[in-house]
Image (cartoon, rainbow, N blue to C red):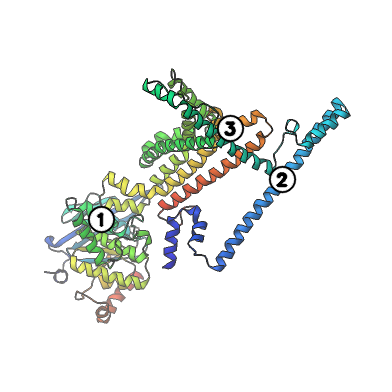
Amino acid sequence: MAQDIVLKENKKSMVFLKPITTIFKGKLSKEKWLLSAKKTGITLASVLLFLILWHFGSQALYNKEANYKINKTLKEQGAAAAEAERACIYSGENNCQPNTLPSPLQVWQSLQLLIADHYVIKADKKAFEEKMFATNEALAAKGKKKITYTGRPSFIDIVLTSIKTVFAGFLLALLIAVPIGIVIGLSPFLKSAFNWFIQIFKPVSPVVWYLLVFMIVKTLYIGNSSDNSFVISFISVGLCAMWATLVNTAMGVASVDKDYINVAKVLKLGTFQKIFKIILPSSLPLIFTGLRITLSVAWMVLIAIELLAQSPGLGLFVWEEFQNGANDSNSKIIVAMFVIGIIGFLLDRIMLSVQQMVSFNKNEAI
Amino acid sequence: MNVSTILKETENGLFPPSKIMLDLKDLKKVYPTPKGDYVVLENLNLQILKEEFITIIGHSGCGKTTMLSMIAGLNEISGGNIAVLGKHIKGPGPDRGVIFQSPSLMPWMTSLQNVLLGVKQVFPHATKSQRNDIAKYYLQKVGLENAFYKKASELSQGMQQRVGIARAFAIKPKVLLLDEPFGMLDSLTRGELQDILIEIWNKEKITAVMITHDVDEAIFLADRVVMMTSGPRAKIGSILNVDFERPRTRKTVLEHTNYYDYRKQLIDFLEH
């Protein structure tokens, strides 16, 4: 009985917070403390090993690149120039650093720089808004458009744009895929009508989806000067990612336990009641499995699509830094990489918790 | 005139029509297969009286479940017909309640909601509290007064089947069809549920048709035990009248002088 209660609590709390919540509730016995300490220790050790490998790897690459540069100068410009190059490289001067994989330390510094930069831009923006406050009031009174801040976005703004895009795309996918999936799942006739469509469009690459959406949205936005990159990117993300939900919903609806359908028949439930009381609830776990896949696919294709759509998110950030080729560009790219990875992981954990909440069969959610 | 007197007084096998609840006439079931038709049931005739409890035994795969689901309207009738109170059935309906082998509860609903699902269909004009009262009454009858608001997935197999019984009785069917409802339970729980079933049945006095593999269960519950021949082309092999006083208790049944004779007849039939 006690075990049941624990099980229920675990199910209801956010799963990814479980280790933390159990610690705070003081439920751990001494052995469990030891076990979780061991697990944490192993995780930390592997992180450390990763950082060490990365550090030495990047150092080796740095040396290779530096030696190549010095040798090249030696061949082309003679010994004196080569010596000057060597001195320049090892003095740490910005303009002669080899361009290669950054070390963990450089990435860490870049992260701090990006965050500091955020506060600078934020202050700048605030100052601008205060300065323009009176002007904007006057413009608003005349019914004209306000003057807004048009400086470059900070890293945090960029991350937020990406998250906003992915959620808009996810919502679009949900609104399209779930209803269509239900309809297809309910009727074998419609299933065969839609099947070719699903089979053909499911494997289409994000890039092509982007181009398709671009063609359509561009025309729809004719005569409208406002920025449509956000619209294009979230629609492309949604269309790319919705297939998992569509297929899973259709499958969930079509494969409702025959016993439940028999019960519905014996009780003479109407079509409406049958769908909402029996078919939908019983296919919820599969629908949410689909939604979870959709969200992770959406986050993955987002980067490529933002790059193409010139939408000011992480995808564009990475691409611009790569084109930029500044001294710290590479480490900024790695920062973006980690941020993308961590956010993707968190999104997946959140969806997993939701999935486990709606799942009535305790063993089902994976 | 109660069931046992009718059974005793009817000698030529023709019951007075006004007393018949369920009438299976020349019932036939054919499954088409690539190798030709497979005839499961053929020439199956059975008349079941009002307020009678029938148990059906027969070897696995002989077509008992097919017959029951045809009565329930879940399975197409290939030939012959089934009538409830003289009217031919077309598809399933709330006049025939079913208790399935697996409890078949909606795991995301509470036990009360599961019972209400059917009650709403049968009493569309009742108020919400009236429906609740009906559902709660039957849940109490099956001993679940403390589990109204428990999710079906949190209940044990035995408790789930209790909800199944409550759900079937709550729609006030004329005929109750039971497809090995206790087959998946351990023998202790099975005994408990048999007692509960027979207690409610005694009160509600509806016609019951139950499939079972358990010879003792068949005798304990039934007015008549129907033995089906092995398939294909299964039909009624023989019928055993169980002439015990009702209400019965397990003890009086076991001590009855006829009990072992009945039991021997059934086992002899099954072994041939």
Q: Is residue A339 above or below residue A43?
A: above
* A217 to the left or right of B27: right
Q: Position of residue B236 (x, y in %)?
A: 27, 63
Quarter of the picture containing the N terminus of chain A is bottom left
Three-letter amino acid code at the position of disc 3: Phe
Could you tell me how far apart the alpha carbons at marks 3 and 1 are, in whole angstroms?
57 Å
Which element carries disc 3, helix, strand or loop? helix
Q: Is residue B139 visible?
A: yes
* B46 to the left or right of B156: left
Q: Is residue A105 above or below residue B20?
A: above
Callout 2 environment at 10 Å: few (<14), some (14 to 19), or many (20+)? some
Residue at 66 percent across and 35 percent down: it is A330
Kindly indicate the quadrant of the structure image that contains residue B115.
Answer: bottom left
Residue A55's disc number = 2
Q: Which residue is mark 1?
A: B116
Badges 2 and 1, same chain: no
Q: Which residue is mark 3?
A: A317
Could you tell me how far apart the alpha carbons at marks 2 and 1 are, in whole angstroms?
65 Å
Three-letter amino acid code at the position of disc 2: His
Residue at 20 percent across and 56 percent down: it is B129
